[in-house]
Amino acid sequence: MPRPDVQEDLYDAESVEAGLDALDTPVNAREGSLARRIAGRVLPPVVAIALLVAVWQALWAAAFWPEFKLPAPVDVWGQIWQLVTTGEILELFWVSVHRAVIGFAISLLIAVPLGLAIANISVVRRGIGPLVSGLQSLPSVAWVPAAILWFGLNDRAIYWVVLLGAVPSIANGLVSGLDQVPPILPRVGKALGAGQLSGIRYILLPAALPGFLGGLKQGWAFSWRSLMAAELIATSPELGEGLGQFLHNGMSLSDISMVFAGILLIFVVGVGIELLVFRPLENSVLRARGLTVTAR
């Protein structure tokens, strides 16, 4: 049987360990029940949307603007519901979203090697780095006329605009993440025998991942915005009808409720990709690094 002083030491050690575990536990993991956490995440945006619709309805009822400038919320909902019942909404989403995903994937394949070169080769950083930053600040819509003249009214023109919008943002995000990696990490990798490629794969990229994720999110935002700009201008039956084409049709028909419906659908896709893809990915990266994930 252990002596009393030994038992007391074991008890103290267990208490300290339990206290440290409690400190390491993310705050949001200890906040109430599952139902309360879900309500805390769902209710605020629902309330915000309800307030926005109420203000919109009040402004429409007050008739500050004529009907052709500000439609009633029910008219916009009618446009969206018609798209849902006819199944046309699936085609709109498919045409636009699959283009955005393909363009973003191609941009990723181009931007990662470009970002690595800019971050690790001083001559490339001095020569190409400012050009990439300049391309990022250039509105993607400026490339649409040139892309149409180069490629015609087809998917290649649209993908070209998407690439020029997304590649600079992803590359600069990767460069920013790599610049924040402590210099001692690559040195330790070399001391342990890591080569150039293995050091990039196992040391630099994982260490730069949190910053790189910010670049990915911004790259997707630029990709989506570039695609909508291209679809708004480059309209053709051969391209199919995406969300940008739907918005353009509403403008051509002077149908403001159709225009508002298109804007809302574009907004829904942007928010959906953020909530379903990038936020879970970002939270998993933070948890893997032992960082507290705030309830968002």
Image: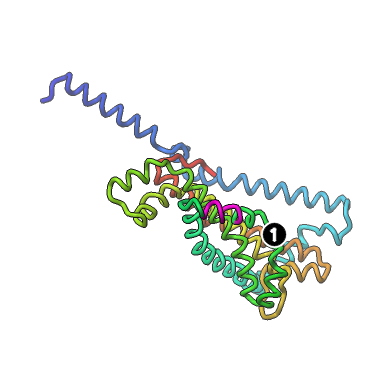
Q: Residue 214, position in %: x, y? A: 53, 50
Question: Number of marks in the image?
Answer: 1
Per the picture, the main secondary structure of the magenta-coloured stretch is: helix
Which amino acid is tagged 1? Leu
Q: Nearer the viewer, residue 112 or 42?
A: 112
Q: Residue 194, position in %: x, y? A: 31, 52
When the figure is inspected, residue 150 is found, relative to residue 175, above or below; the finding is below
Query: Quick check: can you spot residue 246?
Result: no
When the figure is inspected, residue 25 is found, relative to residue 222, above or below; the finding is above
Tell whether position 129 is magenta. Answer: yes
At horizontal 42% and vertical 45% (from top left) the residue drawn is 287
Crowding at label 1, few (<14), some or many (≥20) Cα neighbours within 10 Å? some
Asked whether, in this view, residue 67 is left or right of residue 205, the answer is right
Q: Nearer the viewer, residue 133 or 259?
A: 133
Q: Quadrant of residue 161?
A: bottom right
At horizontal 21% and vertical 21% (from top left) the residue drawn is 8
The part of the chain drawn in magenta is 124-131
**Quarter the C terminus occupies:** top right
Residue at the outermost top position: 5
Q: Nearer the viewer, residue 130 or 139?
A: 130
When the figure is inspected, residue 277 is found, relative to residue 244, above or below; the finding is above
Asked whether, in this view, residue 214 is left or right of residue 186, the answer is right
- Residue underneath mark 1: 264
